[in-house]
């Protein structure tokens, strides 16, 4: 999911992508949560990522078998996995109160930390534990599909990752950016790392702030994360006026965008493919229109209008940029014409 694929005949089948799910968690002030992965991680080492991870049949339910098209579609097992992984990795539990479904479940720090580690160790079942605490994972109303990414075939460790948006409730009092309060009797805890198991830090920033740090080389964002943050930055504006009304308008505009284009962003399936190297700076140009070999012939499609430019270095991707595909190909044609 992080690098590129050059179309070519293969003598052996590509590695089977493992099902996984991630959440783009939006705070009460329209900031996005990213986690800083440890340097020794087997996936995205040292990068900043959205909370998420592999599905677990033991925790999340029956996972469709390889070869089943349902393995690459939004479903309950992906939704349970997304919310469970978010809880394990950040400590934020996206669960509704059984007595009042309008409110998120509130737990003490001790309850949350004990449950977080118990779920991670598989010593308790996540959904059973949430029910015992008086809640239910918010899999139906809260999670909004926002693209699927299938790792290119030239990468040994492949994933089929369902991305979701989740909007934390807006606060009645948004005077403090850092409180993360949502309602008078429901507090979203400040996100924390998982103690260094997979992440060393967890925090909310605006999409534009995350992108600026990546452009400056202060953090590593792989193409999927950079691309999705770029899209969010067009609607969750950091330089816009703040306040409840402004945040509501930003969210409404983003929701309208998700329904736009064909296919809509809720259904797009993207497996990045290397199209060429940019003549002027050597960066790889990634096409985003293909869904991956597992979904060829199914009608699934990605984004045919945009591309991602990236320079792959030893420490990770650098100089990442989102551009219009037509502009890049026009520039390349004009550059060749001047030779």
Image (cartoon, rainbow, N blue to C red):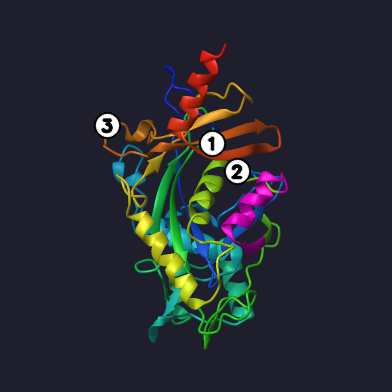
Indicate which disc, 3 or 2, sits on the residue closer to the N terminus: 2
The kind of secondary structure element at disc 3 is: loop
Residue drawn at 46 percent across, 26 percent down: 329
Viewer-proximal residue among 115 and 328 = 328
Residue behind mark 3? 297
Q: Quadrant of the C terminus?
A: top right
Residue 187 visible in rendering = yes
- Is 189 placed above or below 294 here? below
Indicate which disc, 2 or 1, sits on the residue closer to the N terminus: 2
Residue 203 within the magenta-colored segment of the rendering? yes
Q: In screen coordinates, is 252 left or right of 25? A: left
The kind of secondary structure element at disc 2 is: loop
Residue behind mark 1? 157
Q: CA distance from mark 3 to mark 2?
A: 29 Å
Name the outermost residue toward the front. 338
- Is 247 placed above or below 51 here? below
Indicate which disc, 1 or 3, sits on the residue closer to the N terminus: 1
Residue 1 visible in rendering = no
Which quadrant would residue 164 be assigned to in this image? Answer: bottom left
Q: CA distance from mark 2 to mark 1?
A: 8 Å
Crowd rating for badge 2 (residues with CA inside 10 Å; few <14, some 14–19, many 20+): some
Residue behind mark 2? 43
Residue drawn at 56 percent across, 72 percent down: 242
Viewer-proximal residue among 44 and 24 = 24
Q: Residue 209: give x, y in percent of width and height.
A: 64, 56
Point out the stretch of residues depicted in magenta: 202-218
Q: Residue 325: give x, y in percent of width and height.
A: 45, 33
């Amino acid at each position: 999911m992080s690098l590129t694929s050059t179309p070519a005949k293969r003598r052996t089948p590509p590695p089977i992508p493992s099902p996984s799910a991630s959440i783009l968690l939006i705070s009460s002030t329209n900031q996005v949560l990213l986690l800083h992965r440890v340097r020794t991680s087997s996936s995205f080492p040292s990068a900043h990522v959205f909370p998420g991870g592999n599905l677990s049949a033991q925790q999340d339910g029956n996972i469709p078998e390889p070869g089943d098209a349902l393995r690459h579609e939004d479903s309950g097992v992906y939704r349970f996995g997304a919310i469970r992984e978010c809880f394990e990795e950040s400590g934020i539990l996206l669960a509704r109160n059984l007595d009042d479904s309008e409110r998120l479940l509130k737990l003490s720090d001790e309850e949350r930390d004990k449950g977080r580690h118990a779920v991670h160790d598989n010593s308790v079942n996540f959904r059973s534990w949430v029910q015992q605490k008086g809640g239910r994972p918010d899999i139906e109303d809260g999670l909004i599909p926002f693209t699927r990414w299938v790792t290119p075939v030239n990468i040994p460790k492949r994933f089929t990752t369902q991305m979701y948006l989740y909007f934390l409730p807006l606060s009645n009092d948004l005077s403090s950016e850092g409180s993360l309060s949502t309602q008078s009797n429901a507090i979203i805890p400040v996100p924390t790392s998982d103690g260094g198991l997979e992440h060393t830090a967890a925090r909310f920033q605006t999409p534009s702030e995350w992108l600026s740090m990546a452009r400056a080389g202060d953090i590593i964002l792989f193409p999927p994360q950079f691309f999705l943050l770029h899209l969010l930055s067009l609607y969750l504006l950091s330089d816009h006026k703040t306040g409840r009304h402004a945040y509501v308008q930003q969210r409404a505009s983003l929701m309208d965008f998700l329904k736009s284009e064909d296919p809509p962003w809720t259904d797009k399936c993207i497996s990045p493919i290397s199209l060429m190297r940019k003549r002027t700076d050597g960066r790889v140009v990634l096409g985003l229109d293909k869904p991956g070999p597992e979904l060829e012939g199914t009608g699934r499609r990605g984004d045919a209008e945009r591309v991602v430019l990236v320079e792959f270095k030893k420490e990770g991707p650098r100089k990442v940029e989102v551009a219009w595909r037509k502009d890049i190909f026009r520039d390349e044609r004009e550059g060749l014409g001047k030779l």
